[in-house]
Image: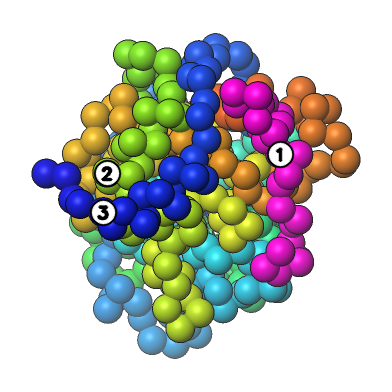
Amino acid sequence: MKRKLPAALITAFNAAAITATPLAAQEILDRQEPLPPPIEEMHPVIVPRPLERIPTGEFGDKVRLGYRLFVNSQLLRDRYVGNDLSCVNCHMDAGRRANSAPLWAAYFAYPAYRKKNDKVNSFAERLQGCFTYSTNGEGPPVGGAEAIALSAYAYWLGMGGLMDFYELDGSVPAISDEELVKGGRREDFPMPVALKKALPVDKRAALAGRGYPPLQNPPEAYSPERGQQVYVEHCLLCHGADGQGFASAGVHTLPPLWGPQSYNWGAGMHRINTAASFIYENMPLGKSIQLTQQQAWDVAAYINSRERPQDPRFLGDVEKLRKKYHHHQCYYGQSLDGGEILGSEAFADFPRRGD
Ligand code: HEC
Ligand code: HEC
């Protein structure tokens, strides 16, 4: 059923809307590599323990702090976070939900090589990436309390889920800060012997539910123009006619999808394929998987054809950056229907707040 919108809202929305010609989905090498597809057969899905089971004491305090920073990342505003988003806005249910890039699956997938920064990334280095791009800020130092806390939270979710799955009793063993930030995909990771046997290192990156499951290519080339209609019908009431979401008491309960307070031009979510998979699985919130795959692609193209904060790797030349890093399904450095080159009007990066 279509909901009727106030006429003024629709007019304001249409005035701001772009009139784009659909760009064909491109089959070009993606240098900003998305998560790899599942390698071999997947490990069956695990279920993280309920938060009430976080233990008391020093280790539990780290886990609890990690949880708090994850669901309200604005606690780190202007230190490590440069926009209005929180981690939980894209990693649903406090990073617990399968198929929504859950922390428990991520934790056992690092250390891992990443093309994006051309080195082996520990778990803490990987989460620094989401600070830099998704929350348009600057990753907290690997040895600092914040990175340790977020790693402890991810470890606790993953290890608890695995212990339950393999019927190992007891609380999740506390491990040192140094071990925590590295991640669980290594031979020397401290783990109960039974678990080590059940889940050898080469199987750990393949926990079912990791990442956002990729969608098939759309039947028709994705179109921001059609996506705008999907947006009006399915998204506008929560994310606003101007895509800026809604805040109460200074905190965005409904997060912005583009503009100065959203993820930047280097974030995974600016890729149309990644946003399409996320949206298909998770949006509209509370009644997901009600869009067709085509609609998910189209609306992903629409929101990612709007201006947002600059790619932090920008050195003054949009075209150069596009050639270097944007060989994937995105609109950075492109002009839609003769409009501005996207990226050329991008908002300033962290730490300048509210530009
Ligand atoms: C705008 C959405 C968004 C926000 C906000 C966000 N992330 Fe992410 N995150 C993603 C996407 C998309 C991916 C998957 C990347 C890909 O497919 O390239 C990801 C991947 C990750 C991974 C690796 C997952 C894996 O399985 O390898 C970790 C860890 C992570 N994010 C942590 C965080 C933390 C911590 C925060 C808060 C500081 C955060 N993210 C905020 C979108 C977001
Ligand atoms: C019922 C309200 C509601 C509707 C309708 C809705 N969303 Fe959301 N959306 C949210 C909330 C709330 C979050 C943050 C989730 C969280 O923190 O748990 C979110 C998060 C997002 C995010 C990741 C965070 C960000 O700001 O980039 C994207 C992208 C997104 N929504 C796109 C869409 C699209 C596209 C539609 C329409 C198909 C849509 N949403 C419909 C409430 C909604």
Residue at 43% across, 24% down: 223
Residue 326 or residue 181, whichever sits in front = 326
Q: Is residue 351 magenta?
A: yes
**Mark 3 packing: few (<14 Cα in 10 Å), some, or many (20+)?**
few
**Mark 1 packing: few (<14 Cα in 10 Å), some, or many (20+)?**
many
Q: From the image, state whether disc 3 or disc 1 is nearer to you.
A: 3
For the stretch drawn in magenta, what is the main secondary structure? loop
Vertical comparison of 151 with 66: above or below: above
Residue 120 in the image: x percent, y percent? Answer: 69, 40
For the question of whether residue 192 can be seen, the reply is no
Q: Quadrant of the C terminus?
A: bottom right
* Numbered mark located on residue 5 in the image: 3
Q: CA distance from mark 2 to mark 3?
A: 9 Å
Which label's residue is closer to the chain start, 3 or 1? 3
Residue 274 or residue 157, whichever sits in front = 274
* Numbered mark located on residue 343 in the image: 1
